């Protein structure tokens, strides 16, 4: 989000312990967040408000701890009255973004301008409950904040990405095939109690899409139509059309793993019972199975005592090193995955498809194989790139969502009653 963009200035922007009471204050905060420090006259010019209105609003914002005045700066010529400057206090509050996945929770703590000042991760037990997740996240955040002489009390809002379908309100997980213990409203309630601030849950792939867009915006490579495709043992997509993330009626638009495409009717096996047809046919688990059928890891030494993610990392590394069975396995799942890309292309016709998730470690090799697979489809296909955010995409997107939440006008308090 570019709060320095004039089109954004009408939005109600960041808040403090007591949120702004006037539209003037929100407009001033938007300008200061984008361009601090500024003189009072500079703020007035940027907002088209009178100096008197700006001065009144700044006095209120200073009392709330959201802005800070500095000593007057003399003019280069020494003539005229020195101009006093004011800056937005990005450190007035903090937001949390987190990503819950099998075996771990990652998190980042950001200021009110989105700068991540602390990050970390914690392990989760097998079959982690909502209580396990809430405790691990709250303890990890608290430790990192204490390192910076802060506390959980300084956190205004938290957004947590989870592997599953989350309702539109962001407080209930309807379906999580990989972490079924988290289904229901228990995780949201426990996180709110542990972090002592408003909490929003969202699908991890949708948050990764927001993180990717924010990153691309920061590097001036933003696309109005973009599809972020998570490719690992699970397959899903975040679809952006006209600059807006498509959620659908049930908030699960883009759940590509449940596509049933030509040839994807693989009967579920015990290890795949929770996967949809497309991710069973074109996901990381199928890549590992195909590789072993072709002679990769024939003696089992590469896969011994490793998790599925570690086994996949080993397969990708072997393919990059030229191991033929590994390369051919990736080639085949890339050919299959291309059907999913082509399906998205036929419906959405995006400018860009960004590949994220565990398979994205394949980098240039994976893109080359995927382009070969897409090349057989008749329609012109979108540009393909690999996400540069890696495991941090969800956390970055969650931080951005939290910032957006504290900017909304109906969040008039940083704490729930």
Image: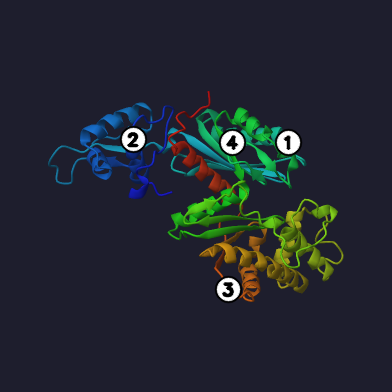
Q: Nearer the viewer, mark 2 or mark 3?
A: 3
Give the mark nearest the N terminus, 1 or 2. Answer: 2
Residue 165 location, quadrant: top right
Question: In whole angstroms, how far apart are the C-alphas of marks 1 and 3?
Answer: 45 Å
Residue 89, x across and y down, in percent: 39, 36
Residue 401 locus on image (x, y percent): 51, 43
> First in sequence: mark 1 or mark 3?
1
Residue at (42% x, 31% y) in the render: 16
Disc 1 to disc 4, C-alpha distance: 18 Å
Q: Position of residue 267 (x, y in %)?
A: 83, 59
Q: Residue furthest front?
A: 249
Q: Earlier in the sequence, mark 2 or mark 3?
A: 2
Instruction: Mark 1 vs mark 4: give the one in front.
Output: 1
Q: Are marks 4 and 2 in contact (CB under 8 Å)?
A: no
- Residue assigned mark 2: 23
Which is more toward the observer, 396 or 183?
A: 183
Q: Which residue is mark 1?
A: 129
Mark nearer the N terminus (3 vs 4): 4
Q: Residues within 10 Å of mark 2 (few under 14, many from 20)?
A: some
Query: How would you rate the neighbour count of disc 4 (Cα within 10 Å): few for under 14, some for 14-19, many for 20 or more?
Result: many
> Can you see residue 149?
no
Residue placed under numbered mark 3 in the picture: 379
Q: Quadrant of residue 388?
A: bottom right
> In the image, which is nearer the foreground, mark 1 or mark 2?
2
């Amino acid at each position: 989000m570019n709060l320095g963009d004039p089109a954004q200035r009408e939005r109600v922007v960041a808040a403090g312990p007591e949120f702004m009471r006037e539209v003037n204050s929100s407009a001033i905060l938007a300008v200061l967040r984008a361009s601090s420090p500024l003189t009072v006259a500079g703020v007035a010019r940027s907002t088209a408000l009178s100096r008197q209105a700006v001065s009144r609003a700044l006095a209120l914002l200073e009392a709330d701890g959201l802005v800070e005045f500095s000593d007057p700066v003399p003019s280069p010529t020494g003539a005229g009255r020195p101009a006093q400057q004011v800056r937005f206090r990005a450190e007035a509050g903090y937001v949390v973004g987190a990503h819950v996945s099998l075996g771990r929770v990652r998190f980042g703590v950001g200021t009110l301008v989105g700068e991540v000042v602390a990050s970390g991760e914690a392990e989760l037990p097998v079959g982690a409950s909502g209580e396990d997740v809430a405790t691990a996240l709250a303890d990890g955040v608290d430790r990192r904040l204490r390192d910076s002489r802060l506390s959980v009390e300084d956190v205004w809002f938290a957004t947590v990405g989870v592997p599953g379908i989350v309702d539109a309100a962001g407080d209930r997980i309807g379906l999580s095939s990989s972490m079924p213990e988290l289904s229901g409203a228990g995780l949201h309630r426990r996180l709110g109690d542990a972090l002592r601030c408003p909490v929003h849950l969202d699908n991890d792939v949708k948050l990764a899409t927001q993180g990717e867009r924010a990153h691309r915006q920061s590097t001036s490579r933003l696309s109005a139509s973009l599809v972020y495709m998570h490719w690992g043992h699970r397959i899903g997509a975040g679809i952006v059309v006209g600059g807006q993330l498509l959620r659908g009626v049930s908030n699960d638009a883009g759940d590509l793993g449940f596509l049933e495409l030509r040839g994807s009717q693989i009967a579920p096996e015990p290890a795949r019972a929770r996967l949809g047809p497309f991710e069973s046919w074109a996901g990381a688990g199928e890549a590992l199975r195909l590789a072993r059928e072709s002679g990769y890891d024939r003696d089992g030494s590469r896969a011994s005592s490793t998790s599925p993610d570690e086994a996949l990392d080993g397969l990708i590394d072997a393919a990059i090193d030229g191991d033929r069975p590994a390369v051919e396995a990736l080639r085949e799942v890339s050919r299959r995955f291309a059907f999913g890309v082509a399906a998205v292309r036929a419906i959405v016709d995006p400018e860009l498809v960004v590949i994220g998730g565990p398979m994205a470690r394949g980098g240039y090799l994976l893109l080359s194989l995927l382009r070969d697979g897409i090349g057989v489809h008749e329609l012109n296909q979108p540009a393909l790139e690999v996400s540069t955010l890696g495991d941090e995409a969800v956390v970055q997107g969650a931080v951005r969502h939290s910032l957006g939440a504290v900017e909304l006008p109906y969040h008039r308090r940083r704490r729930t009653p």
